[in-house]
């Protein structure tokens, strides 16, 4: 399939614009009604503030009634969002172009010691928003300035930068195109940019978390339609030090979209506390799959027994799951994180149980629950605190660059 056309070429025609009228009417009507009835809504069924209640209601109604055509026309392209970010922060755009024409955009210094390959969310259907780049900019700035180690390493390099993959979105491209682009970018970072695997993080939010897990699956079990990823360091990296390790440094999964099942309890429990709906998730999943069946790469919650064995020895040192307590994806995330941790004998995960019983506390794979939207919580601070009905627990600086 062809990549997403330029934003200018996706402009709606007259009759297509008319189709927006009932969508906008639904958004305004639902938001107005929610405002009128807000004080009668149980606190257990609404976000923590009135502003969030209004915002989530409007967004949830929009994505529920939207169509793929209007969604693409209304959203800026990933390239447009990157340029908007660069203009806002007065930074020079820096782009990596892969052999097939796929682009990836730098946030922070290309000469950084470590790189976070970031996959944005959006149901594989919505391009990256400017807020994705702003969040990364804020995180990288804070981590580089607040790390226990100094921001520089003696040769003028900063600690961390991000490289955002501009993957093709549905309906213009379907699975496994996005996984192929992710594998190509990782190979480019390792072979062309000469980063040691131990200096590479991968991760993303929502669909980007799905893509991260798909890439880890591909490292362990190569997908027949996707370029092979070889994490073994080349001769230049075999110095006996950190650069000789053939594992990625970490995988950061921010509210990862691990399941297409919308019948879980968290969808019902958090239906009015999240900004996405079951209908929108189903629509995005259908577009992403493009008629293909689900498999362990595209729906990581449903993998064969033993699928994740060797993850800690062959693919990645640390895996971090992040989930919002009030998001509809929560149950799938907890199930996936628990299942993957159970197969990694050398790791001891800290995974909260949705039941009142205390969860086993282990060491490397973590699933921390933020009471608010996870991305906002990540932007706000580097601390995640769980609230009832989960255990109380706190993780400080989970993205610290100098962790063992």
Image (cartoon, helix red, strand yellow):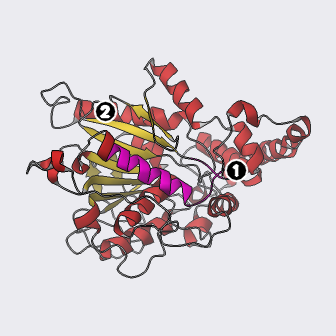
**Left/right of residue 104 with respect to residue 219 in the rendered view:** right
Badge 2: residue crowd in 10 Å (few <14, some 14–19, many ≥20): some
Which quadrant would residue 189 be assigned to in this image? Answer: top left
Coordinates of residue 32 in the picture (x, y in percent): 77, 43
Which quadrant would residue 192 be assigned to in this image? Answer: top left
Residue situated in front as seen by the camera: 273 or 3:
3
The dot on residue 134 is none
Give the magenta part as a residue range: 168-190
Label 2 and label 1: CA atoms lie apart by 32 Å
Coordinates of residue 80 in the picture (x, y in percent): 59, 30
Q: Main secondary structure of the magenta part?
A: helix
Residue situated in front as seen by the camera: 265 or 320:
320
**Left/right of residue 16 with respect to residue 73 in the rendered view:** right
Q: Which residue is mark 2?
A: 142
Q: Secondary structure at mark 1?
A: helix
Q: Which residue is mark 1?
A: 63
Question: Is any part of residue 206 visible from this angle?
Answer: no
């Amino acid at each position: 399939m062809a990549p997403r056309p330029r934003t200018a070429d996706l402009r709606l025609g007259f009759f297509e614009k008319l189709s927006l009228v009932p969508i906008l009417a639904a958004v305004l009507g639902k938001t107005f009604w929610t405002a009128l009835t807000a004080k009668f809504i149980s606190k257990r069924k609404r976000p923590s503030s009135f502003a969030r209640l209004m915002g989530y209601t409007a967004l949830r109604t929009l994505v529920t009634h939207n169509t793929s055509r209007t969604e693409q026309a209304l959203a800026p392209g990933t390239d447009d969002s990157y340029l908007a970010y660069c203009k806002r922060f007065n930074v020079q755009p820096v782009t990596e172009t892969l052999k097939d024409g796929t682009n990836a955009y730098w946030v922070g210094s290309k000469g950084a010691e470590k790189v976070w390959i970031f996959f944005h969310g959006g149901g594989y259907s919505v391009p990256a928003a400017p807020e994705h780049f702003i969040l990364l900019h804020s995180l990288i700035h804070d981590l580089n300035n607040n790390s226990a180690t100094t921001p520089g390493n003696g040769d003028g390099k900063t600690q961390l930068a991000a490289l955002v993959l501009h993957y093709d979105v549905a309906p213009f491209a379907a699975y496994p195109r996005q996984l192929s682009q992710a594998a190509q970018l990782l190979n480019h970072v390792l072979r062309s940019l000469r980063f040691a695997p131990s200096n590479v993080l991968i991760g993303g939010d929502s669909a980007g978390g799905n893509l991260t897990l798909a890439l880890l699956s591909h490292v362990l079990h190569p997908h027949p339609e996707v370029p092979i990823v070889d994490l073994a360091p080349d001769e230049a990296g075999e110095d006996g030090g950190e650069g000789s390790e053939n594992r990625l440094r970490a995988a950061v999964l921010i509210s990862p979209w691990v399941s297409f099942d919308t019948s879980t309890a968290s969808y019902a429990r958090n239906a009015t506390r999240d900004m996405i709906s079951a209908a929108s998730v189903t629509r995005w999943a259908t577009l992403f799959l493009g008629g293909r069946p689900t498999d362990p790469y595209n729906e990581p919650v449903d993998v064969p027994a033993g699928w994740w064995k060797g993850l800690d020895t062959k693919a990645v040192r640390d895996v971090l799951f992040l989930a919002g307590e009030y998001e509809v994806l929560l149950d799938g995330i907890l199930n996936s994180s628990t299942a993957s941790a159970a197969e990694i004998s050398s790791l001891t995960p800290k995974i909260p149980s949705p039941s009142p019983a205390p969860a086993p506390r282990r060491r490397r794979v973590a699933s921390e629950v933020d009471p608010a939207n996870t991305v906002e919580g990540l932007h706000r601070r580097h601390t995640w605190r769980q609230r009832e009905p989960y255990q109380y627990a706190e993780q400080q600086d989970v993205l610290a660059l100098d962790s063992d």
